[in-house]
Amino acid sequence: MSIPLVIRPRAESVEGQPILRPLPSAQRRSVGPFVFFDHMLETDYAPGSGVNIRQHPHIGLSTLTYLFEGELLHKDSLGSDQRVKAGEVSWMTAGRGIAHVERTPADLLASGSRLHGLQVWLASPKEAEQGESHYSHHPATNLPVSDSLGVSIRMIAGSGFCLQSPVPVLSPTLYALVQMQSATTLTVPTEHAERALYVLEGDVSLNEEPIEPHSLVILPEAEEMSLYADSESRLVLFGGAPLDGPRRMNWNFVASDPALIDQARARWAAGDWPTVPGERERIELP
């Protein structure tokens, strides 16, 4: 029996929003296609304050935003203008280049709001890195759910546990929200080569070893693992097929070829990039 790798996230802030970021880390750069994992911590915004992530670029990845509380407005250079509510999926594939903004909607900015959620990046397969950009929004009612013996599994993206999400992932993917009542058990199957779990809240044990909340645990490959909830708990299971080669990450850019990142940085610096309609402010290169 292999010993799982446990990663404690580092605390950071994105434009004032506190986050925990367990991935990437020095211990592990990716799990399946996932190369970036941000837990946006529960934050109460007073009237007049909120999230405002100005126009910025991406290449070579897909972003997925999933909220537990609150709402965000997504706008991008494709012309998308979408309000994203708790329980919904906001999915954006960058391809060769896209720009977007994410902010608190105007009415919630005026009234004050609370935000809690996750944003992950999935590296695109090499053949799709320089493909077309794409955006899609998926209501909560379209995400499949399994509910049995006190364990609820919502498939946010990809497939697993006999569930298939409609989100158009580019490679074999597992991204599931699991809610467990007290004294329940879940067997994590080996249907995906690489798997990890992130405990959002609750008292959870993996193969009888307790896991601290806000820990990322890399599961051993090809081994079934058993989860037990000592209290009402919530966690995320994610992973998929291994990447088709290493990825370089620089700022908001992900690529298998460093030259693609150099080109993207030069294009953004020169203003040679698709722009978000109606947006003037942007985040400059670090």
Image (cartoon, helix red, strand yellow):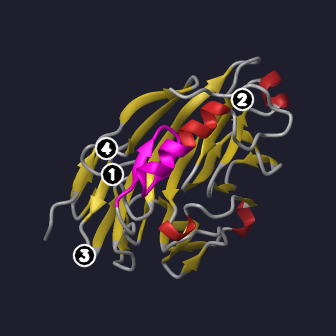
Front position among marks 1 and 3: 1
From what the image shows, is residue 266 above or below residue 261?
Answer: above
Q: Which of the two labelled residues, at mark 2 and mark 4, occupies the earlier sequence position?
A: 4
Residue neighbourhood size for the residue with mark 1, other residues' Cα within 10 Å, grouped as few (<14), some (14–19), many (≥20): some
The answer to whether residue 160 is magenta is no
Looking at the rendered structure, which numbered label has been put on residue 113? 2
The answer to whether residue 254 is magenta is yes
- Residue under label 1: 29
- Quote the CA–CA distance across marks 1 and 3: 21 Å
Looking at the rendered structure, which numbered label has been put on residue 111? none
Looking at the rendered structure, which numbered label has been put on residue 25? 4
- Residue 175 lies, in percent from the top left, at 50, 63
**Res. 109 in view:** yes
- Quote the CA–CA distance across marks 2 and 3: 42 Å
Q: Which of the two labelled residues, at mark 1 and mark 3, occupies the earlier sequence position?
A: 1
The residue type indicated by label 4 comes to Ser
- Quote the CA–CA distance across marks 4 and 3: 23 Å
Residue closest to the far left: 1
Looking at the rendered structure, which numbered label has been put on residue 223? 3
- Residue 235 lies, in percent from the top left, at 44, 54
